[in-house]
Image (cartoon, rainbow, N blue to C red):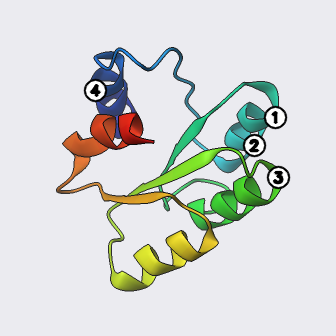
């Protein structure tokens, strides 16, 4: 929840972002994907329910128009490569590049 609060604080300062939806588990996230108009998904690999990799696969398969940005502490080359191969448009190291999120979103 701390990460979500920090993200909201950063994103609310970004003028181009009109609406922000949050989910704390896989099921909530899938529901939001179906019910809301979402252009960009910020997704952590750690996610309650199923992991973020599974949600990335689901999103790309069912909503290919949505852009997925992975935000994680699991930053090994393996995870970065896997996420990009599965369709993530960007991978952000949550521990050191957190403040780049707004800039990455605006670049998409």
Quarter of the image that includes the N terminus: top left
Neighbour tally class for label 3: few under 14, some 14-19, many 20 plus, Cα within 10 Å: few
**Quarter occupied by residue 71:** bottom left
First of labels 4, 2 by sequence position? 4
Q: Percent from the top left, x then y, of residue 23?
A: 59, 35
- Horizontal and vertical percent position of residue 37: 71, 25
**Label 1 with label 4: CB-CB less than 8 Å:** no
Residues tagged 2 and 1 counted as in contact (Cβ below 8 A): yes
Which is more foreground, mark 1 or mark 3?
3
- How many angstroms separate mark 3 from mark 2 (CA)? 10 Å
The answer to whether marks 4 and 2 mark residues whose Cβ atoms lie closer than 8 Å is no
Pointer 2: what residue? 30
Q: Estimate the x, y position of residue 53 in percent, counting from the top left.
A: 60, 66
Q: Circle 3 is placed at which residue position?
A: 62
Mark 4 and mark 2: Cα distance apart in space: 24 Å
Q: Residues within 10 Å of mark 4 (few under 14, many from 20)?
A: some
Comes first in the chain, label 1 or label 4: 4
Q: Earlier along the polypeptide chain: callout 3 or callout 4? A: 4
The residue at which mark 1 appears reads as 34
Name the residue at 61% across, 34% down.
39
> Vertical placement of 3 versus 53: above or below?
above
- Helix, strand or loop at label 4? It is helix
What is the distance, in whole Å, between disc 2 and disc 1 at their CAs?
6 Å
For residue 2, which quarter of the picture? Answer: top left
The residue indicated by pointer 4 is 10
Give the Cα distance between marks 1 and 3. Answer: 9 Å
């Amino acid at each position: 929840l701390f990460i979500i609060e920090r993200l909201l604080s950063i994103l609310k300062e970004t003028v181009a972002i009109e609406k922000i939806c949050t989910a704390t588990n896989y099921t909530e996230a899938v529901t939001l994907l179906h019910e809301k108009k979402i252009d960009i998904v910020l997704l952590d690999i750690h996610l309650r329910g199923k992991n973020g990799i599974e949600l990335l696969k689901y999103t790309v398969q069912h909503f290919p128009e949505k852009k997925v940005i992975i935000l994680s502490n699991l930053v090994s080359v393996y995870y970065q490569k896997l996420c990009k191969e599965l369709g993530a448009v960007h991978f952000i190291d949550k521990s050191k590049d957190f403040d780049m999120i707004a800039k990455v979103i605006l670049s998409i």
